[in-house]
Image (cartoon, rainbow, N blue to C red):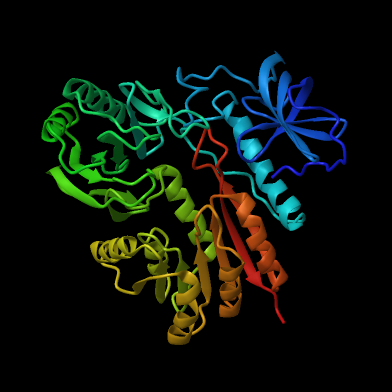
Amino acid sequence: MERAVAQRHPPFRRGAEIDLTIDRMAYGGRGVGRIDGFVVFVPDTAPGDRVRARLWRVKPAYAEADLIQVEAPAPGRVPPPCPHFGPCGGCVWQHLRYNDQLGAKESIVRESLAHIAGLRDVDVRPILPAADPWAYRNKMEFTFHPEAILGLHRRGAFDRVVPITSCLIQSEAANEILRVANEWASAAGLSRYNARDHTGLLRQLVIREGRRTGEMMVALITTAPEVPKARDLARLILAAVPRVVSVLHGINPGASDGLPLTAVSLLAGRSYIVEQLGGLRFRIGLETFFQTNTAQAERLVETVGALAEPREHETVFDLYSGVGTFSLPLALRAKRVYGLEIAARAVEAAGENAALNGIGNVEFASGDVRRLLPDLVGRAGPPHLIVLDPPRSGAGNRVMRKVIAAAPPRIIYVSCNPTTLAPDLGDLVGAGYAIRTVQPLDLFPHTYHVECVVALERNAA
């Protein structure tokens, strides 16, 4: 997180055009430049760019600007290979060389820890890059739009969609499914969802792929249960991509795409796909949370195991355990693992995954971590190790207090947002834990997102 320099009177007014040099990238994807110490954020820039920009928001401590022109491009700037880059909100850093993306993410981690939590003398290891930064996503969600469009949301616009013919961060098989669905929707003549007035039938197309097994899932999301010619879509998809083993129909009549589905029905095949991660098998349903980069998720699991060092006599608590991504590998090395997760469907899936892999020394419970953790300590005793992987918003002070009260000798914190990781780590350090190491990983090439695994140990009294 970039720290802006506070000033009583900003040196510029809204609408002013300025020239500046970009010196770094900020969390959120924009470049950062300064004029006499005054911070200006500019999108679509690269460190080293000399740009002309127009200010559209001016605050006492910083300003935000739109890019007018790159007057002198940085050495790290490259032509974006995707024809949809720019308007499309899927990627924001395709104009940066991949090595420069990695360097920017590593810097963002260091700056977030230092500026937000005052953690400056921390061992931040070099980021673990993706072996292939293209075609890495195992899940994509495309949106239907009334203007006969199927694509991805336009940057910064909830009600506008960029038509996508081929996406470079998903597989060719997924692109073929996208093409078939687009042609079917055009021929079927069904109404498409309008995010402004909440009318229309076709809402989203979800594609999931088991990168290790090859199995694929396709789901049509609509606002109502009756969808003429839905089974025609299933037939067309199965004919075009035979490794699709699941075609589903989900219903979401709500105002938000993020709402849970009210119903899911089977159009063809089965209701799940199977994926392998680190030698373990996981069943993945339509609404199952699973890391979207399989290859890097395997490195993430390996990193957690290597830093956690679970021993055969130890008890491990896995907070925000999801479908057992960390719980199950840890259970192969520990005496017993307890997973806590608020999503009941994820807990059910985690139990199924444990059975699928023949792992019996793991137990999952559904509920709020903040409320379940003290009860679990009372029932199972203090853990030797706590692993937590909270949502993007972080665990928060109330959960961290419960973690501290559980008094584990070791903690592994997995985070997808360094700006919320930092204050949670600050709480742990303030309570007597020492940060042993921070390992960033790149799970989301061409975006500003960065994953981190942090190992902490309780200081001796």
From the top left corner, tell me how far across and down residue 269 is, in percent. 13, 44
Q: Residue at x 47, y 75 (%)?
A: 371
Direction from residue 428 to residue 306 in the image, left or right:
left
Does residue 174 appear in this view? yes
Q: Nearer the viewer, residue 385 or 233?
A: 233
From the top left corner, tell me how far across and down residue 423 is, in percent. 66, 59
Q: If the image is split into quadrants, where does the N terminus sit?
A: top right
From the top left corner, tell me how far across and down residue 186 is, in percent. 22, 21
The total number of labels drawn is 0
Q: Nearer the viewer, residue 288 or 223?
A: 223
Q: Residue at x 51, y 35 (%)?
A: 445
Q: Nearer the viewer, residue 55 or 234?
A: 55
From the top left corner, tell me how far across and down residue 238 is, in percent. 15, 32
Q: Is residue 291 above or below residue 133?
A: below
Q: Give the residue furthest to the front.
A: 197
Residue 37, by quadrant, is top right
Residue 348, by quadrant, is bottom left
Direction from residue 26 to residue 399 in the image, left or right:
left
